[in-house]
């Protein structure tokens, strides 16, 4: 099927159906119901240039990766999906496709530490300028726009403070200024939030997180509804080469099939955890967009299906007390990353966000971040209670 036909068929199906079927026709040769892992680098040609199904060399295209890429495009409601070796590889490909030296980017004051590092330590050396805005305040984004601004970068909910950005409002501001809006949709996943429908030009994912969902693969993705940009991205993906391997693509696809049911449980468990923490005397502040007093609650309620599985909180007693809570947790595994079926706990200041120390993106030292898994919520609440006791 052509991209256009795929897009039309997908528009008529619901998310849960697309998650399981989009891009995943039964194998033409064997009827295998699950797309096989095409662990292969090159393809026999029927005469010079006689490619079967367009496959020539697996950096350019591989059938397992194609299946995932069509699945990703359908889930985000986009035209073109691309799968990479990691979230940062996807970001790098995007930035080097749409930027040249001298361009300017607006980045959020609360973002994944590695994204900040990409701008501050890598892109800057190649002549890309950046400045920081509080993207939860659209006026702050407008104030940072310059004549050479080409990209506005948004993460919503953000990592690790769960800030919420109004995607529609910021898309209008970015477009009025001649810039593209990129949304890192890793925390929400396309089941909870669809940035392209709200005006974003490109969606970024670390598929390592909720898309993969089982803490067993590192991967990244881009999805766009702009067909011309999609072609440019495909060109750069091949020219730069940081593609997802066949087995990694297969693992992410296995994950996306259950994304809807997993996200429902992540959100339900996280809501209970956020309520419990809010009532706890050793907790100074809870960051969860599902709480009515969260400053982004109304916007989150408007643009998200539910509020997701990430909860951060500040521990009364400061940095050492926060580190102690992380060390005492048992069922919540102490570790980086997020979005897997198992619950994780971490101290962003010393772990995931250590690279933002001393910058505008520095995080509070008494902050603890939870990735609330899909275990029994009663067991999760009991573990947090003992860790805080
Ligand atoms: C993990 C993460 C990334 C980077 O993805 P990798 O797969 O680790 O390269 C980007 N954005 C967010 C929000 C993340 O959580």
Image (tube, rainbow, N blue to C red):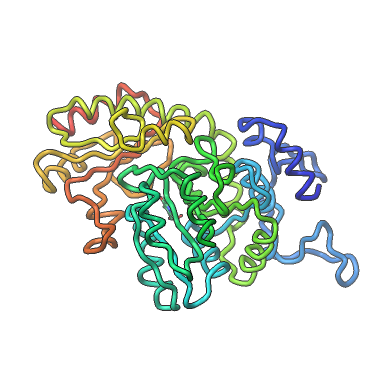
Q: Is residue 158 above or below residue 131?
A: above
Q: Quadrant of residue 129?
A: bottom left
Identity of the residue drawn at 69% across and 56% down: 227
Instruction: From the viewer's side, name the closer residue of 27 and 368.
Output: 368
Question: Which residue sits furthest right?
Answer: 47
Instruction: From the viewer's side, name the closer residue of 268 and 107.
Output: 107
Left or right of 362 in this view: 252: right
Image location (x, y in percent) of residue 247:
59, 52
Task: Work out which quarter of the rendered image holds the C terminus and state it.
Answer: top left
How many numbered circles does the render carry? 0
Question: Which residue sits furthest top?
Answer: 378
Identity of the residue drawn at 33% across and 49% down: 336
Instruction: From the viewer's side, name the closer residue of 302 and 73.
Output: 302
Image location (x, y in percent) of residue 233:
63, 63
Identity of the residue drawn at 59% across and 62% down: 243
Image location (x, y in percent) of residue 318:
11, 45
Q: Is residue 252 above or below residue 289?
A: below
Left or right of 58 in this view: 371: left
Image location (x, y in percent) of residue 330:
25, 35
Left or right of 235 in this view: 281: left
Q: Quadrant of residue 317?
A: top left
Identity of the residue drawn at 76% across and 65% down: 56
Instruction: From the viewer's side, name the closer residue of 230 and 137.
Output: 137
């Amino acid at each position: 099927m052509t991209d256009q036909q795929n897009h039309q068929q997908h528009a008529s199906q619901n998310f849960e159906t697309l998650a399981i079927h989009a891009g995943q026709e039964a194998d033409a040769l064997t009827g295998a119901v699950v797309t096989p892992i095409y662990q292969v680098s090159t393809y026999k040609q029927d005469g010079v240039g006689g490619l079967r199904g367009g496959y020539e060399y697996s950096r350019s295209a591989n059938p397992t990766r194609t299946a995932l890429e069509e699945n990703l495009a359908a889930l985000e409601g986009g035209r073109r999906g691309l799968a990479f070796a990691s979230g940062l590889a996807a970001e790098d490909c995007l930035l080097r496709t749409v930027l040249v030296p001298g361009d300017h980017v607006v980045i959020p004051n609360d973002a994944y530490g590695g994204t900040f590092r990409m701008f501050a330590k890598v892109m800057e050396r190649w002549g890309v300028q950046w400045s920081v805005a509080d993207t939860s305040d659209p006026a702050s984004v407008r104030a940072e726009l310059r004549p050479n601004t080409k990209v506005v970068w948004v993460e919503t909910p953000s990592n690790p403070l769960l800030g919420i950005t109004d995607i529609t409002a910021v898309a209008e501001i970015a477009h009025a200024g001649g810039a593209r809006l990129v949304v890192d949709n890793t925390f929400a996943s396309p089941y909870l939030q669809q940035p392209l429908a709200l005006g974003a030009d490109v969606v970024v994912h670390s598929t390592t997180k909720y898309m993969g969902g089982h803490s067993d693969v590192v991967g990244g993705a881009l999805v766009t509804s702009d067909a011309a940009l999609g072609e440019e991205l495909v060109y750069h993906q091949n020219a730069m080469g940081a593609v997802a391997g066949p087995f990694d693509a297969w693992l992410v696809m296995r994950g996306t099939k259950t994304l809807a049911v997993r996200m429902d449980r992540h959100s339900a468990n996280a809501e209970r955890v956020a309520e419990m923490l809010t009532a706890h005397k050793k907790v100074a502040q809870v960051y969860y967009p599902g709480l009515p007093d969260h400053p982004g609650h109304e916007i989150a309620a408007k643009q998200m299906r539910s509020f997701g599985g990430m909860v951060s909180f500040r521990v009364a007693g400061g940095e050492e007390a926060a580190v102690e809570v992380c060390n005492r947790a048992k069922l919540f595994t102490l570790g980086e990353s997020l979005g897997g079926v198992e619950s994780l706990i971490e101290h962003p200041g010393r772990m995931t966000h250590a690279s933002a120390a001393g910058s505008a993106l520095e995080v509070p030292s008494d902050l603890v971040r939870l990735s609330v898994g899909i275990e029994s919520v009663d067991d999760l609440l009991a573990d947090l209670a003992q860790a805080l006791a």
